[in-house]
Image (cartoon, rainbow, N blue to C red):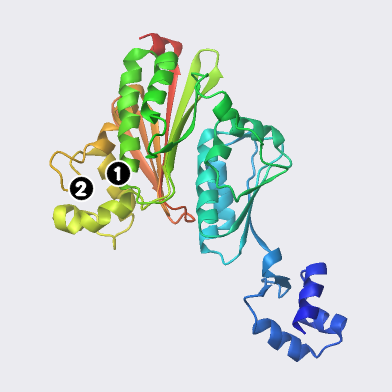
Amino acid sequence: MQKGITKLLKDSPGLKAREISKKLNLDRADVSTHLHGNLHLYHQDASFRWFLWESVSFDINILSRSAWVSSEQFESALKSSGSPHDSDFKNVVIKLPIQCKVKLCAAAKILAISNQMAAIGKNVTIDFSESEDAVSYLNRAGFFDRLHSSVKIIPKRPKKSAAQHYNANSSRLVELHPIGVPGGENVPERLKKSFIDVVGSEHANILFHAVGELVSNVEEHAGSKQPGFAGLQCYRETPTSLQIMTVVSDSGMGICGTLRPVLERKYPELAVEFDDKTPAANPKLIVHAFMNRGLSSVDDEGRGGGLKNSTHPMEVLNGKLSIRQENFSVTLRYSRGEVSANWVLDLPRILGTHIISELRLTNRQKSA
């Protein structure tokens, strides 16, 4: 019976039990008993149709009304599908929209969740069949260099790395480099060189120290076997203005994951203020960590200023900082010395911390 059902579902997936029994001339009750008794082989969907587990996939279909796929559009797709972390499906497929361009912020999240799925043994496919032009940019940005080797690319993975071939020859792009890898690229230094070319030396020093703090935080606290990564892309929005986007990403414990275990011992007053049984406690803890000094999971004296230091260029240059945690995100917006914070709860799971900083500079600001 098993061989017959397996072959039938391989050739004709999505049949109901009565259709299977009719086609194989078997008793319907026996077929139903066999299917329900072997749920490691067969999957039944909400319409009571049966599939082989090996043939079904968890699909994340990214939609975009514009030519660009942003972080927000990836999050919207994930919200529609749910997180593959919470699915038993062995196969995960991420499909890009027609003729799209992929912003670095979206590429970082696609990269992170793809690697996380591959690391736990899932079969991951990224489908660029309707957006092949995106492959060229992602190859130049180092996306495929950081992508787990088991991830399948449709139509095909680039044979040669454009990121390695053209490494460091553009001031407006810092390829996605691994963080915390012995002998690897000094990512903050690479970013500083780009900052100097793009925004001038005055702002470059501010940005360098800020990103350096975020990179150091990932290196020290990520707690993941998967290397984190960081990169930069400048987008010309108008003839007189630039958007400077940096991403710092890891697949570890997350900021809350490292701070929560030490709160009661080191910061009892904050443990009360940000009691995890109260609404939005974790986002509020993140906001506190980025807006105040002295909060650290490390016992060394003088620690805990890094996250606050990383916001300095946002304050000076009126930027935006987005901090994605496992199941929520926080956004800090800076304008004329004021900061506003908002958050989104109950997001589909992505492990780790994924930080996107965005600055918009005019020619006047650059020359100031």
In the rendered image, the quadrant that contains the C terminus is: top left
Q: Nearer the viewer, residue 187 or 101?
A: 187
x 32%, y 48%: residue: 255
| Vertical placement of residue 110 versus 183, above or below | below
Q: Nearer the viewer, residue 199 or 240?
A: 199
x 40%, y 12%: residue: 366
Q: Earlier in the sequence, mark 1 or mark 2?
A: 1
Q: Residue 129: horizontal and vertical position, in percent?
A: 73, 42
Inspect the image, locate mark 1, and give the three-letter code of the amino acid beneath it. Glu
Q: Mark 1–mark 2 contact, CB under 8 Å?
A: yes
For marks 1 and 2, give the CA distance. 10 Å
In the rendered image, the quadrant that contains the N terminus is: bottom right
| Vertical placement of residue 217 versus 236, above or below | below
Q: Residue 61: horizontal and vertical position, in percent?
A: 65, 50
Q: Is residue 355 left or right of residue 156?
A: left
Q: Is residue 125 left or right of residue 192?
A: right
Q: Is residue 163 left or right of residue 51?
A: left
Residue 129 visible in image: yes
Q: Element under label 1?
A: helix
Residue 12 visible in image: no
**Residue assigned mark 1:** 220
Q: Residue 361: horizontal and vertical position, in percent?
A: 43, 19
Q: Residue 200: horizontal and vertical position, in percent?
A: 38, 13
Q: Nearer the viewer, residue 316 or 191?
A: 191
Inspect the image, locate mark 2, and give the three-letter code of the amino acid beneath it. Val
Q: Element under label 2?
A: loop
x 74%, y 91%: residue: 29
| Vertical placement of residue 132 versus 93, above or below | above
**Residue assigned mark 2:** 298
Q: Nearer the viewer, residue 224 or 260?
A: 224
